Amino acid sequence: MTSGRRAVLVLTVLGPALLGAGPCALAAQAPGGSGPPHAPDTGPPDAPRSLWSRGWRPVALSAAVPGTGQLALDRRRGWLYLGAEAAAWIWYADRRGAADSYRAAYRDHAWERARTWDGARVDGDFDYYERLARWHTSGAYDGDPGATGLQPETDETTYNGSIWARARGLFMPPGARGEPGEPGYEEAVAYYRRRAYSEELLWDWSGDPGAQEAYRGLIDATDVRARQATAALGVILANHLLSAIDAFLTERGLSGRAGVGPAPAGLRGAHPSAEGPAPGGRAGAAAGVLARTLLALGGGPGRPELGHVPPAGVWHLIVSWRIP
């Protein structure tokens, strides 16, 4: 028999089973089943089972608290997942606390060594403290407090001076001196007001460059510990995911062993090792037909395509497939 005819035979035999034929149609194709098919089962359908009753309870438990699903399945490795979870949370809390401590330290350092405001302390946002690490001085906010209106800082080596230079480039024509009355001056001043730092946030490291280096070290230490805390969260997430997958695979393995039973009647005697676990219902019938077909096509002389497949291995491979 050619391989093409074998394929046609497989499809002919398996087609009704895989496309939804009932157990009666499958029984009609069994060896010795040449009689008329039995009447279809008209009994009430099985009540649908919930996900919880279908074995998802260990998976849900492990996804919520790693290790609990394994312990529910009497697997002692669940304690390893629980231990890893506790260690990761301890690591996260330690790194998060260290980052917060360094953050408070660099803010205190900046206030004591660089800030020029004499009033009550005002803390800036994240970007403000990053700029303190890059710029030696903020410059003045109002270059001439005695004059009418706001006189922006003009020294472009300072942070506020760089903001004013950018504002002039955006809103004023080339060659403009940045004086009142020139085209775009009011728009440039409005831009400067929104982005330059006012008196309560000014700083100056120029008289103590070593203090700025120490400040940068505190910033770097904060960033390192914040990244470590983020890595700890990644470990926690991975532990939840791995524990849930492990619980799913473990539960599936237990279900497969729990379904051990005799092989379908049509398969008995086809091979000495054909007795084995057999899933019930339509899936079991389809598996039986497939097993009989493969055993008929392979395992004998003159059939090199499938003859190398051990029939017992084929059967156990087939019945290991279970419909969720």
Image (tube, grey):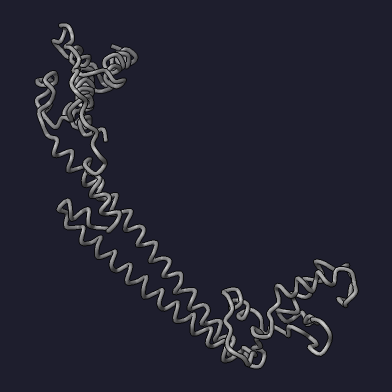
Q: Residue at x 18, y 38 (%)?
A: 256
Decide: is 201 above or below 14.
Answer: below
User: Where, by quadrant of the figure, is residue 110 drawn?
Assistant: bottom right
Q: Residue at x 26, y 46 (%)?
A: 248
Q: Residue at x 26, y 20 (%)?
A: 17
Decide: is 303 above or below 213.
Answer: above
Residue 318 horizontal/vertical position (percent): 22, 29
| Quarter of the picture holding the C terminus | top left
Residue 289 horizontal/vertical position (percent): 21, 20
Decide: is 273 above or below 29.
Answer: below
**Residue 209 versus residue 141: which sits nearer the camera?**
141
Residue 314 horizontal/vertical position (percent): 21, 28
**Residue 8 versus residue 38: which sits nearer the camera?**
38
| Quarter of the picture holding the N terminus | top left
User: Where, by quadrant of the figure, is residue 30 drawn?
Assistant: top left
Residue 123 horizontal/vertical position (percent): 57, 81
Left/right placement of residue 106 relative to residue 309 reads right
Decide: is 25 above or below 106.
Answer: above
Would you say residue 87 is visible in this rendering?
yes
**Residue 122 versus residue 13: which sits nearer the camera?**
122
Left/right placement of residue 125 relative to residue 54 reads right
Left/right placement of residue 179 relative to residue 47 reads right
User: Where, by quadrant of the figure, is residue 162 drawn?
Assistant: bottom right
Q: Residue at x 90, y 74 (%)?
A: 181
Would you say residue 300 is visible in this rendering?
no
